[in-house]
Amino acid sequence: MRRFFFVFSVFLAGFSCNSSSSTMQQSTDIPKNFDWQGHRGARGLAPENTVAAFLKAMEYPEITTLELDVAIAADSQVVVSHEPWMSETICSHPDGRPVEETEAKSLNLHRMRYTEIKGFDCGKRGHVRFPEQLRQAAAKPLLREVVEAVNAYCKQNRRPVPRFNIEIKSKPEWDGIYTPVPEVFARLLLAEIETTGIRNLTCIQSFDKRALQAVHQLAPELTMALLIEDAGGVQEQLAELGFTPKVFSPYYQLVTAHLVKAVHEAGMRIIPWTVNETETMKSLIALGVDGIITDYPDRIPR
């Protein structure tokens, strides 16, 4: 009988511990300052790079950073958009006609004033790759409109204001056609983050090393992230860039224990993109990454 009560007591103790295991798991396995980033807001759940997507991401308390892309309109306004044109996958003309693949790149944001850009819808059609995404009317917003909406949401809901991880979308072959040259792009973006009051909350990222070099020349103290999409040594990448940014951001399938160690030894944080499966997130956390960019904040392990 005593053995029965001992075993039963141990069972109850174990049950009690397991009942709070989700809380303990979060605090034990995920570092306190882990940076969960909502990719293009919450692209898996709402139209990408729209006010709706950023506010959706804010519903998840784990999200500490909003990841977004910017382009420059003909009137030098900073527009939130992944491509510097109207995507044939998600956008529609003001009259409701879907943008066709043959015309997409002719709908060049850098040749359009923002009054024209905002007439296009990029949310009602949804996205074939993201069936859970809520279809809704959504225009490409200005960066300042996103900041204002997020600040208002956070104030109303007593939520901490997030950081902003802003990607400069540029390529050498786009210079003067789809984008300004990197020096001008950097100047316009830096002026906007200053005006909106998010300078101390901003990281500027890019695959284009020229863009980061331009930002570094103007504001060397600013947090920057080097985006990486193919294999290559960390030191080689940094030598080509010419300075060491605070963040190294590779495609998640490139991440290994060796890469994490090399990045940390170089004095950088490692934040991979774009991770959409919970088990993969757990594996990357176990490898020691410092943050994760995801389309699905609802899949963050808890």
Image: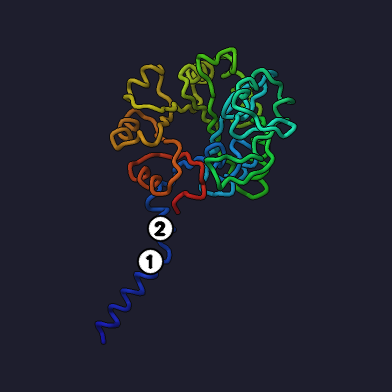
Is 25 displayed left or right of 179 in the figure? left
Work out whether residue 54 can be spotted. no
**x and y percentages locating residue 271 in the rendered image:** 42, 36
Q: Quadrant of residue 6?
A: bottom left
Is 129 displayed left or right of 3 in the figure? right
Could you tell me the amino acid type at mark 2? Answer: Met
**Residue located at (42% from left, 66% from top):** 19
**x and y percentages locating residue 4 in the rendered image:** 27, 83
Q: Crowdedness of circle 1 by 10 Å Cα count: few (<14), some, many (20+)?
A: few
Could you tell me the amino acid type at mark 1? Answer: Cys
- Secondary element under disc 1, as helix, strand or loop, is helix
| Front residue of this view, candidates 280 and 210 | 280
Residue 226 against residue 30 in the figure, above or below: above
Residue 276 against residue 236 in the figure, above or below: below
Q: Determine the CA span between mark 2 and mark 1.
A: 9 Å
**x and y percentages locating residue 285 in the rendered image:** 37, 44
| Front residue of this view, candidates 129 and 287 | 129
Q: Crowdedness of circle 2 by 10 Å Cα count: few (<14), some, many (20+)?
A: some
For residue 79, the mark is none
**x and y percentages locating residue 173 in the rendered image:** 51, 14
Quarter of the image for the N terminus: give it. bottom left
Q: Are marks 2 and 1 in contact (CB under 8 Å)?
A: yes
Residue 208 against residue 154 in the figure, above or below: above
Quarter of the image for the C terminus: give it. bottom left
| Disc with the residue nearer the chain's start (2 vs 1) | 1
For residue 17, the mark is 1
Residue of label 2: 24
